[in-house]
Amino acid sequence: MKKDTSFEETNGTSSITDEKANLAEPKVSPSNMGRYIYNSKTNEMFGRTFSSWIRLVAFSLVFIVVLTVFWAICLWAFSQTMDNYTPRLQTSMSYIGQNPGLGYRPMKNDEDPYSSLIWFRHGGAGNWGDLKANLDYFLSKYEPGSFANAGASQTKCHWDRSPLERQEACEFNKEWLSDQGSDIKCISEENYGYYHGKPCILLKLNKIFGWFPDPYYNVTEVENHPDIPDSLKNHIRSTWEENCRNKGPEKEERCPQLNMVWLDCNGEEDPDKENIGVVSYTPWRGFPGYFFPYWNQLGYLQPVVMVQLKNPTPGVLINIECKAWAKGLEHDRTRRRGLVHFEFLMD
């Protein structure tokens, strides 16, 4: 005989529904809220006695103090392994590596920090004021007295000096950026050439702690290099002939004036090379080796080069690429190693 379970199923469902309803109801009804806040019979506040609250607060304070002391000890122990002035991982051991990239100014970071476009209208009604201000700001640290007590470490450096010691820094005079042979100079007083349509772009090597370049001292090695541009080869050859030719075998083989990280800027593609026009470099066509290595010295000023576009074609977007040249420097457009790319548009 089949057993009738309809009643049991119905009764079971009803019991489950009642239990859910009971769980959904608040334990403290609005009518009992006052008693929940303070129960005079049990001397409980919010469900706890006064002594229970004291124990809870004391435990919380002790836990916070112990946790704070623990993390303070961890941070102190970690700080003992670090140096305030020397990175733990250097050159090839670091993420940056030993292949510096190039940086440039001016940059309109306030408009688009990811844009590499230098665009402006030249002339009196132009919008080049922000570009001039950006260059002024960067060069402000090259003003005398910008670093307190920098004179104690800065010294006049020469071509055949040894690499910098950790407490040495070479002098860099801001006035060197003024090319006396140029009609429009790369100085603030002449608006860095942006007013007259002969703009100046500042180039710098990104600083890598402890990195020292390996220059091309031998001019024959330069001329046989398959990738160095011909214009740069000719410049290096003329530098060697002017300073080291017929000055003895030692200087001819290892010319001090070739102690450089050379710089070359040009259009990326053939149309860009046609539109970029004449390019000049001040004060050198590169970065002298005696400014290296960088040790985070007091008053250290990295060398900079003003690249001036003498007659760029207006109204045309020009893709410009500047490369640094020294032994071991790699050029990678994707990772921006050993070079820098930017776009240029002058209206």
Image (cartoon, grey):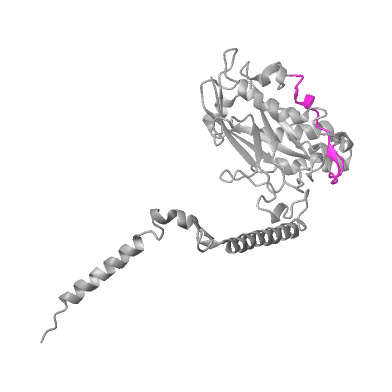
Examine the image and state in which quarter residue 67 appears.
bottom right
- Return the residue nearer the eye: 318 or 248: 318
Q: Position of residue 246 (x, y in %)?
A: 87, 35
Examine the image and state in which quarter residue 11 appears.
bottom left
Residue 21 lies left or right of residue 124; in this view the side is left
Q: Position of residue 110 (x, y in %)?
A: 58, 30
- Return the residue nearer the eye: 26 or 191: 26
**Magenta stretch bounds:** 159-181
**Residue 287 seen in render:** yes
Q: Position of residue 180 (x, y in %)?
A: 77, 19
The residue at 38%/58% (across/down) is: 26
Where, quadrant-wise, is the N terminus in this rendering? bottom left
The residue at 61%/31% (across/down) is: 107
Residue 205 lies left or right of residue 312; in this view the side is right
Residue 112 lies left or right of residue 85; in this view the side is left
Q: Position of residue 173 (x, y in %)?
A: 81, 28
Examine the image and state in which quarter residue 163 appears.
top right
Query: In this view, which residue lies farthest toward the top?
Result: 124
- Return the residue nearer the eye: 59 or 226: 59
Magenta-colored segment: predominant secondary structure: loop
Image height of 249 relative to 19, above or below = above
The residue at 73%/44% (across/down) is: 221
Query: In this view, which residue lies farthest toward the bottom?
Result: 1
**Residue 229 seen in render:** no
- Return the residue nearer the eye: 203 or 314: 203
Residue 119 lies left or right of residue 208; in this view the side is left
Would you say residue 172 sits in the magenta stretch? Answer: yes
Would you say residue 213 sits in the magenta stretch? Answer: no
